Amino acid sequence: MIEDQKTVVNIGTNRKIVDSVHDIPMEDWNTVAKNQNIYLSIGYLSALEDALGDQLQYRYAISYTDKGDPALIAVYQLVVFVDKRRQYSKDLCNLSYHIHKKIADVFTINVLVCGNVFCDGENGFLSRLVTNDQAMDEVAAITESLKTQPSIKEKASITLFKEFWPDSTSYSDRLKRLSYRDFMVDVNMVLNYHESWKTMDDYLASMKTKFRTRAKSVYSKSKELELKDFSAEEIEQNSERIEQLFSNVLEKSDFSFGRLNAKAFANFKRNLGDQFSFRGAWLNDQLVGFSTALFNRNVVEANFVGLDYDFNKEHSVYQRFLYDYVEQGLNVGSKELQLGRTAELVKSQIGALPTNMKLYAKHRKSVSNLLLKPIIQSISPSEFEVRVPFKANFNN
């Protein structure tokens, strides 16, 4: 997010929208991106598109000022929302004729998303030279333009802005004025690194006895695991097993917007190098789990895990990955570790605190948009008890 500036320039007098990352004017894009957000980098976007081009539709937009300066970039994905529980299926069915599939145990609907469905946070757009209100108005204008494209108009009835941190009030207020409805799903679990933590021993020493004992138990149970960094080639060589481990976890999810694959992970590693971490857990020469993370400036973002549940409990594979995320952040001097959604209780036991993030949805028909309100109001974060593992002087 940028701070509002006193000098106001006109934006949107010239706009370019393409459906492939390979058609993006790279110099103009990078002028705005300036390595501020890895999810909006050409390297990340091309890795994603090249791996999932058959699953998703993409749109990339660049807006210019009246003087021809690139001022805003935005990323969109046309995705299929899958609700295995069919929790919102009946209500959503009443809102749209564009239903992809509705059977006994699965409900799906197409959604136009500004942002990235494979990560949490504000990864939909960046701007320069303009105020926050101008940026939000321009993104909204781009969105309306996209919704007139036949390939999108015939599919997506709902537009989703995914998603904003609590301090992004200027963006959120603007979206509300544009008739978008806000809602929250499960919280993002975030650990802020204490300035005194230089090593894992420092981190563990800051814990209350109960939680330090719990951590030592995890290390003891996982002592036979060998955690190893994978290269792109090693990801490809183990792709079949990686897909199997990932499927084990995805099958437990109630809903999804699509799925990554081993090819995407290999692409990320090849394009992003040390900014992308893929760690495999080996047990007696068998791959029993993996974790991925992105180093996004001074933040470590834990993304995905794959697990063999036959070994997970006995060897604390998942919990070992959580402590490994903490250690990876310490090793690179990160300020923050974002652990994402799900498993909130376990993540709070390592010191992560819940952060609410808001999404904004809008139906393209005004009457249906009114009907969307009760559905959105019924969506709320899961309840859990937050644990406080640190001694008083180390709490966030």
Image (spheres, rainbow, N blue to C red):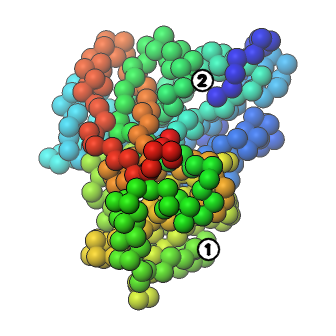
Instruction: Please give the name of the residue rendered at 35% of the width and 77% of the height, measured from the top-left corner.
Output: 221
Residue type at the position of mark 1: Ser
Instruction: Please give the name of the residue rendered at 62% of the width and 53% of the height, measured from the top-left corner.
Output: 196
Instruction: Please give the name of the residue rendered at 57% of the width and 38% of the height, measured from the top-left corner.
Output: 123
Estimate the x, y position of residue 48 in percent, counting from the top left.
57, 53
Disc 2: which residue: 139
218 horizontally vs 22: left or right: left
The reply to whether dot 1 and dot 2 touch (C-beta < 8 Å) is no
Decide if residue 114 is in sight here. yes
Q: Say few, some or many: other residues with alpha carbon within 10 Å of mark 1 (under 14 / 14 to 19 / 20 or more).
A: some
Q: In front: 219, or 256?
A: 219
Instruction: Please give the name of the residue rendered at 27% of the width and 43% of the height, measured from the top-left corner.
Output: 384
Estimate the x, y position of residue 302 in percent, counting from the top left.
50, 55
Helix, strand or loop at label 1? It is: loop
Estimate the x, y position of residue 360 in percent, counting from the top left.
43, 25
**Which quarter of the picture shows residue 187?**
top left
